Image: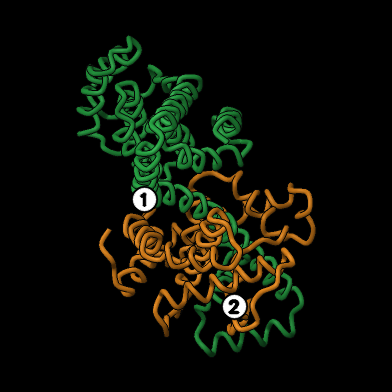
Amino acid sequence: MNEQSDDWILSGLRSPDKGKRNQALKAVYSQFYQSMTDFVCKNSGSEAEAADVFQDVIIVFYTNAQEEGFSLNCSIKTYLYSICRNLWFNTLRRKNKVTPTDELPEIPEEDFVQVLLKTERQQLIAKAIERMGVGCKKILGFYYFDRFRMKKIAELMGLANEQVARNKKADCLRKLRKLMKETPGLEKNLR
Amino acid sequence: MKKSDSKDDLIDKYLLNRLSDDAKRAFENDLENDPQLSEQLEEQKDILMGVQAFQQRQLKEDLKAMHSELIPSQAKPKLRTLNIYRLTAIAAVFAGIAFALGWMLQSQSKNHEQLFADFYQPYQLKIGQRGSAPEQQTADLLRQYSDKQYEAALASAESILAQEPNNSVWLLAAGNCLMELDRPEEAIARFDQIINRNEPFYLQQAIWYKALALLQFGQEEAAAAQLKTLANNPNADHHQEAVELLKAIQ
């Protein structure tokens, strides 16, 4: 795969075209895999751990890239490296391994790490979503994860217009709340 | 649209940072004075995070599949070169040891073949599985496939795929024919077409057969990476077989 520019990658990751997003993800994977995993391996990580962390790095980058007003003030490589350092040192701390003090992250951890959502409640909601139909999974994913506007969602899902998409999303949210009510651990304080 | 829906929309816009500065200030002012709104905001935040968690899980699976697609192809030649150097050096000094190594490599490859033979069952094409292709063509394919005439079945599948390139059933059929014809590399490309589209109904089937094709091709690490996605999901198709095959590989 040819090396792609940062602009090409970023606009691919934010494209509503799934093919382009996939190409951009592949470009990130092949262009930055070696340097990120080298860093983890040089800091007491195995190859498997390095690959796992690198995938989490991409997930954080992808999620952040969808945010309204997201922009990079450094290269993608530097940005990924910051996330990688944060995630990996956090993992080492959890394993009670000492991290080199000169390598301690300069960027507040929560800025990056909070998007890797691991709390029990969110995972339970994710499980409830698993039980939903394909259409609801799609529309909620397009809206809350890919951050597409309703007009774009209507186009992507072949719905008549923006209002139909909005109604569908509202309907899916109602279904999700119902599923959440039936899920042990999630049933309290729901509308 | 119900009143509660427009409230959801407003909360969503706030969470997704889509309100103007004035609207945001007004919303935050309401939040301070309305504990119910504050609760609703928390609930909506949980939903947003839950959807993200669900999507991130899916993305992780895609990235694992991407890993086996992109990384072994770069890493493999390095390993092969190293083995050749190592074998040559040993052969120069101890021809007998080289012979023994050759025998070990051969028996290892028999192992992959044996595992593949133990676990591989062709995908079951059912009579009702058809798309918009002419009925005669699909009938031919179903007959050839069930009669194990895989050359002919592959030709039929290819001709149907020319009309319906994204039909996952025909892609699975073509991939299986290619595996039967001992062309695993081409089979992997067929299964990737389904995996890359994240086709919900056939994704797990495609992952299972891709893993087997990788095993047939001798790439057991890449096969194991695919199998893990099925082994980690107790509800997945082929879950139990994936657990057993993974154990056998490891």
Q: Residue at left 38%, top 31%?
A: B95
Residue under label 1:
B78
Q: Is residue B14 above or below residue B200?
A: below
Expressed as whole percent of the image width and height from the top left, the position of residue A157 reads 39, 52
Q: Quadrant of the N terminus of chain B?
A: bottom right
Image disc number at residue A111: 2
> Is residue B7 visible from the viewing direction of this image?
no
Secondary structure of the residue carrying numbered label 1: helix
Q: Is residue B49 left or right of residue A191?
A: left
Colour for chain B in the figure: green
Residue B33 falls in image quadrant: bottom right
> Is residue B130 visible from the viewing direction of this image?
yes
Expressed as whole percent of the image width and height from the top left, the position of residue A137 reads 52, 51
Q: Is residue B220 above or below residue B14?
A: above
Front residue of B142/A105: it is A105
* Amino acid type of the residue tagged 2 in the rendering: Asp
- Label 2: chain letter: A
Chain (orange)? A
